Amino acid sequence: MTVRARTVRFDDGAASRGDPRDALTGGTGWESSDSDIDVGALTGLHASNPTIRALINGRDLNQTPAGWNPDHETGDRGDAYPYGQCTWWAYKRRAELGLPTGSNLGNGGMWADTAAAMGYWVDSTPRPGDAAVFAPGQYGADGWAGHVAVVEKVNDDHSILISEANVNGQVGPFQRTLPADQAKGLRYVHY
């Protein structure tokens, strides 16, 4: 069987690039204006973690540090914290919230420094889901290990509701409200 290709020209009566063109009139043409479009809303910031992507394009838009990478290495290799410790609860609770947490951030009081060294966003402004880091001895935290809890809510008066474990040797989890003057003295691991 022989197949022959057939070439067909489609230029009979078609416009040519060399033909004269008339300008559109009467306001019926294409408009090139973005006056009705929020151009900034067309492009979102990317993050592989969908929870982080939603936060950096919503609640935390324009608040992340310059040059911060939302896809930094998280160090999450699974829960390596002993059951009942404050670190165990903070890891577990943040996982429930879809937030990354390193598996070996150390004792509670070490979390802010260790996380910052790994690329996490760490500062002194609480947001729901943050790991609230107490330095050793700070506000009743263990004098050697410190403490870590999870911010559940930031109240209008800037006090914070936290959830925590290993309070007075009891597993928990427990909740308590820290007044604003104490909340502003903590460091917070965001994501």
Image (tube, rainbow, N blue to C red):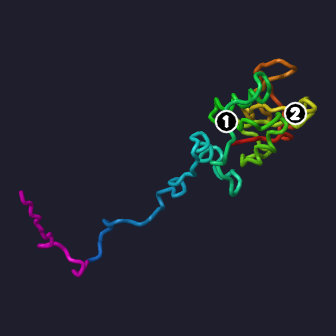
Three-letter code for the amino acid on which mark 2 is drawn: Gly
Label 2 belongs to which residue?
A: 146
Disc on res. 164: none
Looking at the rendering, which quadrant does residue 30 occupy?
bottom left
Quarter of the rendering occupied by the C terminus: top right
> Which residue is nearer to you in this view: 71 or 189?
71
- Decide: is 37 above or below 31: above
> Which residue is nearer to you in this view: 48 or 151?
48
Q: Which residue is drawn at the image coordinates 82% and 34% (left, top)? A: 108
> Which residue is nearer to you in this view: 9 or 151?
9
Return the x and y of residue 90 as percentages of the image width and height.
74, 30
Q: Is residue 20 magenta?
A: yes
| 169 on left or right of 152 | right
Disc on res. 77: 1
- Decide: is 71 above or below 84: below
> Which residue is nearer to you in this view: 6 or 21?
6
Q: Which residue is drawn at the image coordinates 90% and 35% (left, top)? A: 136
Q: Does dot 1 land on a helix, a strand or a loop?
A: loop
For the record, the magenta segment spans 1-21
Looking at the rendering, which quadrant does residue 179 occupy?
top right
Alpha-carbon neighbours of circle 2 within 10 Å: few (<14), some, or many (≥20)?
Answer: many
Q: Residue furthest front?
A: 1
Return the x and y of residue 91 as percentages of the image width and height.
71, 31
Alpha-carbon neighbours of circle 1 within 10 Å: few (<14), some, or many (≥20)?
Answer: few
Return the x and y of residue 6 as percentages of the image width and height.
10, 66
Q: Does dot 2 land on a helix, a strand or a loop?
A: loop
| 42 on left or right of 94 | left
Q: Which residue is drawn at the image coordinates 55% and 51% (left, top)? A: 44
Q: Which residue is drawn at the image coordinates 9% and 60% (left, top)? A: 3
Looking at the rendering, which quadrant does residue 96 occupy?
top right
Q: Is residue 19 magenta?
A: yes
**What's the CA distance linking mark 2 and mark 1?**
23 Å
